[in-house]
Image: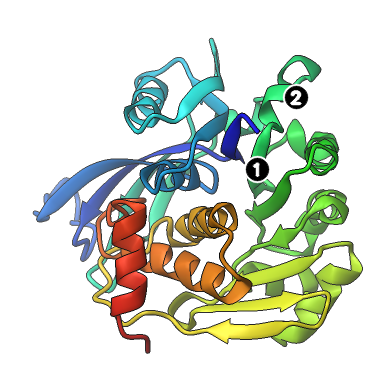
Amino acid sequence: MRYDYASIGFYTYDCLGWPFTEVPPGGGTNFIEELTLAVSGAAGTASIAAAKMGLKTLAVGGVGTDLMGDWVLQRLAHFDVDISTMQQQPGWKTSSSIVTTRRDGSRPALHMKGATADFYVDDAMMEQVIDAAVVHIGGIGLMKKMDTGRNAELMRQAKLNGAVTTVDIFAGSKDDMPAVAMVLPHTDYFMPSIEEAEALTGLTDRADMARYFIDCGVVCCVFTLGGEGAYYHHRDGTKFKVPAFDIAVKCTCGCGDAFNAGFAVGINRGFDPETTVRFAQATSALNATGLGSQAGVESFEHTLNFMKGTKTK
């Protein structure tokens, strides 16, 4: 395979401030302690976190011909992420967010939708995009052109090419299920947050939700549970829960997306399922210790040592 990891979908530019307390009245000003920029999104966070941990990574998505788009491409390249399949077209806007992070890690945001809806993997790009050990789509539900069937075709071809396929989503209700359902028959690991799984299914029991998606064709569900850890449920009946690590949370922005990267590292390293989920959970926890997506993720060795040496809740 040409790559260890291809991360396809939602790339966004984030400007983050910490700690946010309240919007000042009128034209007033409140002072904060930190301000930073980050590449975020279900594909963007994963691509940089994976690259930091040693995976040869391909970024696949779209940005605008604006200052934010230029910076996103520059930042990806800084971490040696291959940006040859990132699309940048006149008239597109880069998906961008202003993220106001509270001391408890929660992060209300203002978001501008952008080129995630516009990019498209055509036949000329397909061979390169699927030439990875793990092919990941992050952001189904935001990818207007790709969500109409192209994501499903991409994942079908990726599996035929021998890739392991992983999927994360951006979903808020059952109305998003048709776009998600198209890719599930070609998905090895479906990795939504527990809130997204509940929204898509209308169910609340983890095992019931997993069986729902497995009936749709998924091989295995891995639900991220926020402060409770993660839940793994394979179609062969294997299921377990991994607890969250006991950390001081600074910012939860991108934690689920960092989890996706850690999971891909585990697959590439040949970890067993429980170690893979624990490593992914460690990546997510490290992400939460810094301000902005990937801030706390440094390297494979750093994440592995954190996993081995940090207490869980």
> For the residues carrying marks 1 and 2, which lies nearer the camera in this image?
1
Mark 1 to mark 2 CA distance (whole Å): 15 Å
Residue 292 drawn at (x, y percent): 31, 51
Question: How many residues crowd around disc 2 within 10 Å: few (fewer than 14), some, or many (20 or more)?
Answer: some
Quarter in which the N terminus is drawn? top right
Residue for badge 2: 126
Residue 20 drawn at (x, y percent): 22, 61
* Badge 2 amino acid: Met
Quarter in which the C terminus is drawn? bottom left
Residue 229 drawn at (x, y percent): 49, 79
Left or right, residue 255 beside residue 127: left
Label 1 vs 2, first from the N-terminus: 2
* Badge 1 amino acid: Ala
In the image, what residue occupies the spot 64% across and 46% down? Answer: 136
In the image, what residue occupies the spot 81% across and 44% down? Answer: 159
Element marked by disc 2: helix
Q: Which mark is residue 298?
A: none
Left or right, residue 104 beside residue 198: left
